Image (cartoon, rainbow, N blue to C red):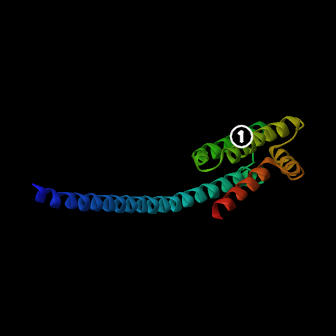
């Protein structure tokens, strides 16, 4: 019996030590795999976020008056028809890119939404200020001139915030 205990105790000690070493080794290996998986997914997420920034930059450009108006046939349109078309274009552009908000900060998204809302207000305000006898072409010219002379626009503010956030992602 004494002899069995003499062999059993060292065997149990070796077994326990082996189990502890194997457990630590497996845990370390699992942590390493998780870290590599996280690193790979971060790279993928960063690429998706950069594409979102690109799309939002295009969105801001496409919703500026000059861009919208150069892509609109003004012939035969009234000011009210043009105003409606401009508001619809801005709304559609933003609606099309609504999903991009999940890739950017809340602060940036708020600035982008402010740019959208301010553009709608701008389009409406200029239309209301136009004399009754004005044409859609007069409205378009007035809008482009007023926008250029408006100082720093919400679009520019949103664009700068977008660039800054993209720079932080790249660094």
Q: Position of residue 119 (x, y in %)?
A: 77, 43
Q: Residue 72 or 6: which is nearer the viewer?
A: 6
Does residue 125 appear to the left or right of 51 in the view shown? right
Query: In the rendered image, which residue does mark 1 sit on?
Result: 87
Residue sitting at x 74%, y 42%: 114
- Compared with 153, 9 (above or below) is below
Q: Position of residue 19 (x, y in %)?
A: 28, 58
Residue 71 visible in rendering: no
Q: Position of residue 117 (x, y in %)?
A: 74, 39
Q: Secondary structure at mark 1?
A: helix
Counting other residues with Cα less than 10 Å from the Cα at mark 1, is it few (<14), some (14-19), or many (20 or more)? Answer: some
Q: Residue furthest left?
A: 1
- Compared with 57, 114 (above or below) is above
Q: Quadrant of residue 131?
A: top right
Residue sitting at x 66%, y 65%: 171
Q: Residue 76 or 36: which is nearer the viewer?
A: 36
Q: Quadrant of residue 48?
A: bottom right
Does residue 144 appear to the left or right of 120 in the view shown? right
Q: Residue furthest front?
A: 2
């Amino acid at each position: 019996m004494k002899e069995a205990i003499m062999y059993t105790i060292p065997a149990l000690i070796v077994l326990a030590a082996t189990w502890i070493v194997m457990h630590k080794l497996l845990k370390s290996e699992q942590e390493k795999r998780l870290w590599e998986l996280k690193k790979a997914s971060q790279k993928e997420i960063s690429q998706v976020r950069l594409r979102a920034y690109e799309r939002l930059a295009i969105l801001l450009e496409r919703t500026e008056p000059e861009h919208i108006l150069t892509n609109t046939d003004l012939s035969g349109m009234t000011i009210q028809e043009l105003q409606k078309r401009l508001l619809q274009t801005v709304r559609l552009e933003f609606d099309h890119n609504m999903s991009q908000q999940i890739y950017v900060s809340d602060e940036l998204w708020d600035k982008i939404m402010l740019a959208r809302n301010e553009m709608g207000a701008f389009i409406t305000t200029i239309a209301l200020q136009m004399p009754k006898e004005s044409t859609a072409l007069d409205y378009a010219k007035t809008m482009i001139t007023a926008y250029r002379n408006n100082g720093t626009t919400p679009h520019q503010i949103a664009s700068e915030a977008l660039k800054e956030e993209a720079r932080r992602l790249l660094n």
